[in-house]
Image (cartoon, grey):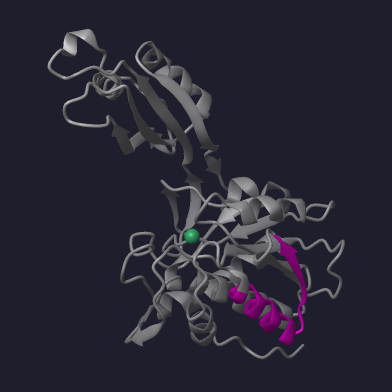
Amino acid sequence: MTVEPVDIVGLTRALVDIDSTTGREGECGRWLADYLRGRGWSVHEQRVDDTRFNVIANISGVVQGFSPAVVFSTHFDCVPAFFPSRVEGDRLYGRGSCDAKGILAAQVSAAEQLRGDGESRVGLVFVVGEERGSDGARAANDAAPGEGPNFLINGEPTDNRLGLATRGILRLKLRATGRAVHSSFPELGESAIDKLIDALIELRSIPLPADPVLGQTHYTVGLISGGVAPNVVSAAAEAEVMFRTTSDAAEVRKAVSPLERRVAIEHVLEVPPVKMKVVPGFDTAVFPYTTDIPFLQAWGEPLLFGPGSIHVAHTADEFVSIAELKQAATHYVTLAKALLA
Ligand SMILES: [Zn+2]
């Protein structure tokens, strides 16, 4: 079958040049759905909310009930701030060039190469909302065919290495309460800020779980607030702590439970760590971030692979190497063929 090769750079730039900051993915989704239809794909626009939808596609000609054996997936939303594409030498700059529109283009290119080779058991699942709570992936999980695809190749920047495992997330809010009084008589009040500081200092010496592959659980106190004025003993203070977990989050919750003598602990969000399938012949690495994979379980056994570096994703001069993008498409074909064999 003759399939027109995908211009990976052109496709990446077209996607980058449509602002799809999380929450505003509608226009980019419409463009992508039209692009895929134009190449002969069957496309399902799966509503996520009033203006945003996932783009789910297959090449077998039947959208409802199709069961691809291998699914490529990534996200087409981006973090702010939007900036358009430009090429300088081997580098393609622009918001989303690395995370993850270049990846999306490489996956489309791979799927089209596979189609050219007569392979029809490939699907595409491109979602919204990855950068803020994964509402797109959560919705996409419900759209998976009952027969369950075998493998999900999810794309995030891994420098063209296969992910062995990714860390999970546990976000907890520590809330301290006190009693406000005039700060000239602090002994008459109770400082919520002092209690919170004591809890955070105690947290530093609490041993946290470790995993042989993912390493030690670590955390960041990313937000802290409290008090109303310099001359008032604080009645309330809180901190948000984000753990990058390496095992069941229940172990972390248990480890930090002694803090409840000082503060109330509120559960905000949990995403489990994931171990992924690997294929011989690829470099592998462990990644400290989480992805949409924990929310796409119905789409098959996960693999993680993508061009570009996580260290330039989300930065003010985000870029991806054009050579690496093109290599990624070749690697995706090799991976899919190994899985389909
Ligand atoms: Zn991403």
Whole-percent x and y of residue 9? Answer: 48, 84
User: Closest to the observer: 196 or 236?
Assistant: 236
Question: What residue appears at the point 60 percent right and 76 percent down from the top-left corner?
Answer: 27
Question: What residue appears at the point 41 percent right and 46 percent down from the top-left corner?
Answer: 288
The answer to whether 338 appears left or right of 89 in the picture is right
Residue 341 shows up from this direction: no
The answer to whether 48 appears left or right of 187 in the picture is right
Please say whether residue 179 is one of the residues in the magenta stretch: no
Give the position of the N terminus as an image quadrant.
Answer: bottom right
Q: Is residue 171 above or below residue 10?
A: above
Please say whether residue 44 is one of the residues in the magenta stretch: yes
Q: Is residue 125 above or below residue 180?
A: below
Whole-percent x and y of residue 226? Answer: 30, 31
User: Closest to the observer: 322 or 264?
Assistant: 264
Report the number of numbered marks: 0
Whole-percent x and y of residue 245? Answer: 45, 35
Q: Is residue 195 above or below residue 121?
A: above
User: Closest to the observer: 38 or 212?
Assistant: 38
**Image quadrant assignment for residue 124:** bottom right
Q: Name the outermost residue toward the top.
A: 188
Whole-percent x and y of residue 151? Answer: 69, 55
Q: Magenta residues? A: 27-47
Residue 56 shows up from this direction: yes
**Image quadrant assignment for residue 242:** top left
Q: Name the outermost residue toward the left.
A: 184
Question: What residue appears at the point 44 percent right and 22 percent down from the top-left corner?
Answer: 265
Question: What residue appears at the point 27 percent right and 20 percent down from the top-left corner?
Answer: 205
**Image quadrant assignment for residue 197:** top left
User: Closest to the observer: 293 or 277?
Assistant: 293
